[in-house]
Image (cartoon, helix red, strand yellow):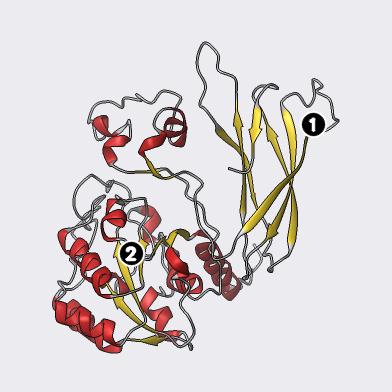
Amino acid sequence: MGKFDINWDQYAKLSRQAAAEGVVLLKNDNKAMPIRSEETVSVFGRIQLNYYKSGTGSGGMVNTKYVAGILDALKAHSNININNELVTIYENWVEEHPYNHGAGWAGEPWSQEEMPLTEETVTKAASISDIALVIIGRTAGEDKDNFAKKGSYLLTDLEENMIDMVCKVFRRVCVILNVGNIIDMKWVDKYNPSAVLYAWHGGQEGGNAVVDVLTGLVTPCGKLSDTIAYDIENYPSTPYYGDEKRNYYTEDIYVGYRYFETIAKDNVMYPFGFGLSYTSFAIENISFTTPTGLYTPENLGVIICEVKITNTGNVKGKEVLQVYTSAPQGSLGKPSRELKAFGKTSELAPGATFTSVLMSEIPCCLATLKFPI
C-alpha cells in the first residue's frame, strides 16, 4: 500500500465548519448576540475549563492531538476582552474540585460538580462586563443514557442558581449548552436569558466553532433534529423508558416530531426543524412539478420543488430549506406532516438570492407539499 499524506489542517478546518454550522440558536432577544467587537465578556460555568468534545463509549475514545474549549477560543480571539478575574476564580476552584472521570466503563458522571456563586462575584463581574456567557455541560454515551434526573436531563440546583443569579444582574446573558442531546428547557421561561444556543459536542475544534458563532464570524444555521417539549412527561416513550425486559412503542408510527405534529402540538416548546439566525430570509415557491410534468410509472410519487430564497437581513448567512408533505388520512392513519427533503443554501450576502431544486418521493400522488414550514 502506498503512502498517503493527510492534510490535518484541512480536516481541522472542515471539522470546525461542521461544528459551527450545527449550532442551533433557540433564542436571541433584541439581537443580544453576536458579541460585539471590544466587548468585555464574563464566562460562568466550570465547563469553560472542561469542554465536552464528545460523549462516552467507543465514539468518545477517539484520540485527538488537542481539544479547543470555549474559553480557550475566547482567549485567543483578538477582539474580545475576557473577565480574567472571574476566570481565575474558576481556575482556583476547579483545582480543588478536579474533573471526575469516574471509574470503569461508563463510570463518568453525566455532569461535573458546578461552582457555587456568590452575589458579590456576580455583581462585580456585571459591573465590568457587557455580556455574560453561561456554559452548561452534559455527557452521555454507551451504557450512559440520560435519565430524568438532576445533573442529567434536568439542571442541578447549582446550575439553576447560576442562571438565575446571572440573569438577574446582567442585561445580556447567553446560555450555551455543551451537550450531546436535548435537555429540559423549562428554565428558559423561568429565568429568561437573552440568548440560548445548543452547541452540542463539537469535537477537537468545538470551542473554536462556538466562538465563530458567538462573534458572528459564522451566522447560526443549525436546525433541531428533535422536538423539545415543555416537559419530559410529554413524550409518549417516557413511561416505558429503561424497561429491563422489553420496549413499548406506544407512539406507533408517530415517531418523534410526527407525534407532536399530529397529536400534541400544544406540548411543543421548540419544534423539530427550528433554528434562528442573525439574519432573515424570504422564501418564494417557484414551482412544484414532476420530472416530466406528468405522472408516469417511472416517476410516480416524485415531485420537484423549486424555491428562491433571499437574504433580507444585514449580515451574511446560510439557511436550511425544508419540505414537508401532508398525506390524506386513510383507514390506518397518517402523521399530519413528514419531512421529505431538505437542503442548505450557500452563504448569502445581504440582498443575495439562491435558487434551490429539491426532489422528493411522495408516498401518494394526492399528497400536499407544505413549504416553507
Location of residue 237 in the rendering, given as x and y in whole percent from the top left corner: 32, 32
Mark 2 or mark 1: name the one nearer the start of the chain: 2
Q: Nearer the viewer, residue 347 or 308?
A: 308
Location of residue 59 in the rendering, given as x and y in whole percent from the top left corner: 40, 55
Under mark 2, the amino acid is Pro
Location of residue 55 in the rendering, given as x and y in whole percent from the top left corner: 35, 57
Under mark 1, the amino acid is Thr
The secondary element bearing badge 2 is classed as loop
Answer few, some or many: residues within 10 Å of disc 1's Cα (few below 14, many 20 plus, some between 14 and 19): some
The answer to whether 86 is drawn above or below residue 322 in the figure is below
Location of residue 147 in the rendering, given as x and y in whole percent from the top left corner: 24, 45
- The residue lying at 27 percent from left, 60 percent from top is 191
The disc placed on residue 193 is 2
Pick the quarter of the image with the C terminus: top right
- The extreme right residue here reads 292
Asked where in the image residue 252 lies, by quadrant, the reply is: top left
**Residue placed under numbered mark 1 in the picture:** 290
Q: Which label sits in the foreground, 2 or 1?
A: 2
339 relative position to 184: left or right: right
Q: Distance from label 2 to label 1 (Cα)?
A: 46 Å
Asked where in the image residue 137 lies, by quadrant, the reply is: bottom left
Answer few, some or many: residues within 10 Å of disc 2's Cα (few below 14, many 20 plus, some between 14 and 19): many
- The extreme front residue here reads 30
